[in-house]
Image: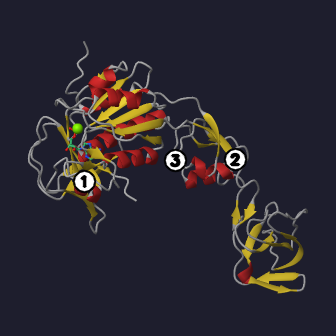
Amino acid sequence: MKALKDLPVEEARARMLAAVSPGMAETVALDRHALGRVLAEPIRAVRDQPPFDASAMDGYAIRLGDGAARFRVIGESAAGHPFAGEVGAGEAVRIFTGAEAPSGCTVVVQERARREGDQVSFEGVLPGERTNVRLRAGDFAAGDVLLPAGVRLDAWRLALAAAAGRAEAKLHPQPRVAVISTGEEIVPAGTADIRPAQIFDSNGPSLATLVGQWGGRPIRLPPARDDEEAIAGAIAAVEAELIVTVGGASVGDYDLVKPALKRLGLELEVETIRLRPGKPTWFGRLADGRCVLGLPGNPASGLVAAELFLRPLLAAWQGADPALRLEHARLAEPLRETGPREHWMRAKLTRDGEGVLHATPFSDQDSSLVSVFAAADALLRRPAGAGSTGVGDVVEVLRLDRL
Ligand code: AMP
Ligand code: MG
């Protein structure tokens, strides 16, 4: 019998990641619809960039080395319309930015040129060899890997792919992720006749948004009551690679999500985690292979667990690196020793005049506080069993993607 309870955070994450692998790659146009998606193949350069020696300035292309001070203008090289001939001693070609620089030439900027008819001379000393010339393949060369597989596309990387002439590429598919809140008391925001005993669903919309932000395709299901049949029924037919349930994750009389999903053949991989907040977070697979991530209902618990597990899961599903991107910061307030669970505290980040990052944990870390999460910049990691930590000590932080 595998031990599934009270797993360290790392081990819980490793068990979850072992359950996922990217699906079949699909060919996708490299336009804004590819934003945030992950390359399933490397993008290679099929030719040099620039493809020819190009002028970086408007001016005159001349050949150095023959001591001439005046040059006869024999033609023009403009972008898209190169000069066809050779430039000899005492000759110049009028040239513009981005135009092909005739072989062996240097470009003198037009601000220094004195033009009289077909003659041109220049103020000051002539520049050195190949000045103001962008050499062929100076940006990249044919055959170079410009973007390796596993890279997430953004506007800058799309520019590189386009510069290489690529209009489409094989991308990993985006996992479909269903999000379902559970609880007798949970009603959708906007419900007009809400009763005093009811609570608006804050996790549903935030988790669905995070799924989209992290590259998945969110599917929002209506909240389910604490009823095994209702929960199993809502999840039975959802077409998704991953189902995220919210609430009912613990061991109370009304924590029915796991018992409900036993009806669909749930096999647990992770039962509880040595994590604060978020101890009841669990993970398993249904008989049909769909994965389920069970999050606790308290908003901070759910969002901490989403950052620590859902985000890496979505990355792995898309063939991207699932590692948490931790940074270092200096603690701005002393902290007492932590207990046996790894603690992820909501914190503000500030940068001082020297550029050093400082983290200030919120004084109230109660896991029900949506207001604190909405104001936080980062999660501050306190390892399980960490001793008291003083002002200025270095701590690890996980920055939240705030816009
Ligand atoms: P549970 O995990 O079901 O025991 O819920 C723990 C606490 O979180 C309770 O106070 C719930 O009312 C609250 N809660 C559960 N689900 C949600 C939700 N989707 N949005 C906001 N609060 C929730
Ligand atoms: Mg509940």
Q: Residue at x 80, y 82 (%)?
A: 121
Rendered-image quadrant of the N terminus: top left
Q: Nearer the viewer, residue 282 or 131?
A: 282
Q: Secondary structure at mark 3?
A: loop
Amino acid bearing label 1: Val
- C-alpha span from label 2 to label 1: 43 Å
Residue 43 seen by the camera: yes
Q: Is residue 219 left or right of residue 156?
A: left
In what quadrant does ligand 2 lie?
Answer: top left
Q: Nearer the viewer, mark 2 or mark 1?
A: 1
Residue 304, quarter of the rendered image: top left
Q: Is mark 1 within 8 Å of ligand 1?
A: yes
Residue 323, quarter of the rendered image: top left
Q: Nearer the viewer, mark 3 or mark 1?
A: 1
Mark nearer the N terminus (3 vs 1)? 3
Locate residue 274, reporting x and y percent: 19, 32
Amino acid bearing label 3: Gly
Residue 321 seen by the camera: no
Rendered-image quadrant of the C terminus: bottom left
Q: Residue at x 59, y 32 (%)?
A: 25
Q: Which residue is mark 2?
A: 167
